[in-house]
Structure formats: C-alpha cells, structure tokens
Amino acid sequence: MYRLGKVDDIDDPNQTLYAAKAMNPSYPGIIDYLFWALGERKTCMNNLCRRNECPIHLYCIKRGLNPSEISYMVRKSMPW
Ligand SMILES: [Zn+2]
C-alpha cells in the first residue's frame, strides 16, 4: 500500500485498513490478503518488485524503490 501511494505511513495499520476499504468497500480483507501473498511469495516487497512476476507493477508508483528502477517503469492509472 505504501509503494502504491495509497498510504503515507508504512507502519500505520489504520491507514492500510482505510485504503483497503476505499479500494474494495464490500470486502477490504481481500486487498490486504493480495499484498500479503505478493510479499510472502517474494514477488513484491517493500524494497523489491519482481516486475516480470508482479501483477500490479504497472499500477505502482514504486515509492521506496531505487530511482533507477523507477525510470524504466510505465505507470498506468489504477483501476479503482
Ligand atoms: Zn510489484
């Protein structure tokens, strides 16, 4: 959520909860699970995104990643 630009404080679970509710009001837990699963599989973590495997890398602003990695990324508008 932090890397996506949806929360400002990476350590504040309330911000994450509110962002998940905004993205999917009827079932915010699925959003949290998605990001947890991406981190658990080491596909997308706070300091690394395996963009060939990451299903959301085109929507991510890459906050917290090395700027050289950001420069070749193409960002699309998020679908929500
Ligand atoms: Zn990613």
Image (cartoon, grey):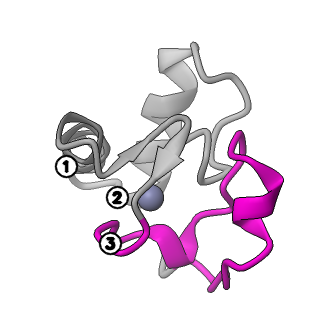
Side of 14 relative to 5 (left or right): left
Magenta region includes residue 77: yes
> Which residue is tagged 2?
24
Residue 41 in percent (x, y) is at: 17, 43
Nearest to N terminus: mark 3 or mark 2: 2
Q: Earlier in the sequence, mark 3 or mark 1?
A: 1
Amino acid type, mark 1: Ile
Judge the density around disc 3: few (<14), some (14-19), many (≥20) Cα neighbours within 10 Å. Answer: few
Picture coordinates of residue 51 (x, y %)?
A: 43, 69
Quadrant hosting residue 33: top left
Q: Reply above or below: 24 against 3.
A: below
Q: Is residue 19 above or below residue 78?
A: above
Label 3 amino acid? Pro
Residue at the front extreme? 68
Residue 73: image quadrant is bottom right
- Snapshot quadrant of residue 76: bottom right
Residue displayed at 68% across by 45% down: 65
Numbered disc 2: secondary structure: loop
The stretch of residues the image draws in magenta is: 51-78
Q: Which residue is mark 3?
A: 55
Would you name the residue on which mark 1 appears? 30
Query: In this picture, is 5 found above or below 61?
Result: above
| Spatial CA span between label 2 and label 1 | 8 Å
- Residue at mark 3: C-beta within 8 A of ligand 1: yes
Q: How would you classify the magenta stretch by its main secondary structure?
A: loop
- Image coordinates of residue 5 in percent, x first then y, are 68, 50
Task: Please report the residue visible at 34 percent of the width from the left and 58 percent of the height from the top.
Answer: 24
Tell me the mark number nearer the camera, choosing from 2 and 1: 1
Instruction: State the residue at coordinates (70%, 62%).
Output: 69
Q: CA distance from mark 3 to mark 2?
A: 17 Å
Q: Position of residue 2 (x, y in %)?
A: 61, 39
What amino acid type is highlighted by mark number 2?
Answer: Asn
